[in-house]
Image: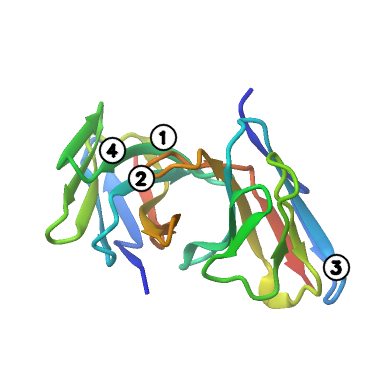
Amino acid sequence: GENVEQHPSTLSVQEGDSAVIKCTYSDSASNYFPWYKQELGKRPQLIIDIRSNVGEKKDQRIAVTLNKTAKHFSLHITETQPEDSAVYFCAAMVIKRGTYKYIFGTGTRLKVLA
Amino acid sequence: EAQVTQNPRYLITVTGKKLTVTCSQNMNHEYMSWYRQDPGLGLRQIYYSMNVEVTDKGDVPEGYKVSRKEKRNFPLILESPSPNQTSLYFCASSLSRVNTEAFFGQGTRLTVV
């Protein structure tokens, strides 16, 4: 079946360093890949997304890269700050039989150490 | 304010006692879905609805029911809750086309004893 693998499950970085979270998806037809950030006790919220017609997208300190051939996509956070500490989920949209759904990764708990 | 609202936020119940978690959105979204979040397992889809009166099973539908009688509401029903349904539940909504953002409710933490 469809699945999304996400690594690492936990990540600790020093403030100011970069953080990279990687995901692999199984359905080659997937063409939309959002990233959600979930702060402690809060709901997941979209921080960036990428569609399959582009290889990279940036928004200030956050960037996402996509390699459709390898079915990999990654989240890059530069100059990390304590407020970046959260759980991050990647997702892939799967379209089948006229319907669609998001398949989420298992999450990465990012800790930014001051 | 555009939002997805779930109720209740916290619920402790006993095995076998039917319960309903409500979800309502004010963004006129066609697509709504329910997820459960468990440690190490991420967000897993329970049920989803493409539009009014159209619902379908997600990846973990056993023990749950849903209904979509109105566009804005998508309640999650547990007819006979069991302890393995103790989890954090999220409702989400989005426009009914591909490649669009999903907006999540605040979450409902359910404990079944």
Residue type at mark 3: give it. Answer: Lys
Q: Disc 1 marks which amino acid?
A: Glu
Quickly name the residue at label 3. B18
- Neighbor class of circle 4 (other Cα within 10 Å; few <14, some 14-19, many 20+) is some
Specify which label sits upstream in the sequence, 2 or 4.
4
Q: Nearer the viewer, mark 3 or mark 4?
A: 3
- Disc 1 to disc 3: CB gap under 8 Å: no
Amino acid type of the residue that numbered disc 4 sits on in the rendered structure: Glu
The chain under label 3 reads B
The picture places residue A46, in percent across and down from the top left corner, at: 43, 39
Q: Which residue is mark 1?
A: A83
Q: Nearer the viewer, mark 1 or mark 4?
A: 1
Instruction: Please report whichever mark, 1 or 4, sits nearer to the chain's N-terminal start.
Output: 4
The image quarter containing residue A48 is top left
- Closest to the camera, between mark 2 and mark 4, is 2
Give above or below for A24 relative to A90: below
The lab-note entry on whether marks 2 and 3 share a chain reads: no
Q: Residue at x 27, y 59 (%)?
A: A29
Specify the label residue A34 is tagged with: 2
Label 2: chain?
A: A
- Which label sits on residue A15? 4
> Callout 2, which amino acid?
Pro
- Assign a secondary structure to mark 3: loop
Counting from the top left corner in percent of width and height, residue B92 is at 57, 46
Look at the numbered discs 2 and 1 and tell me whether their residues touch, using CB distance below 8 Å.
Answer: no
N-terminal label among 2 and 1: 2
A33, above or below A49, in the image: below
C-alpha separation, residue under disc 1 versus residue under disc 3: 40 Å
Residue A74 image point, x, y percent:
23, 50
Q: Are marks 2 and 1 on the same chain?
A: yes
Quadrant in the picture for the N terminus of chain A: bottom left
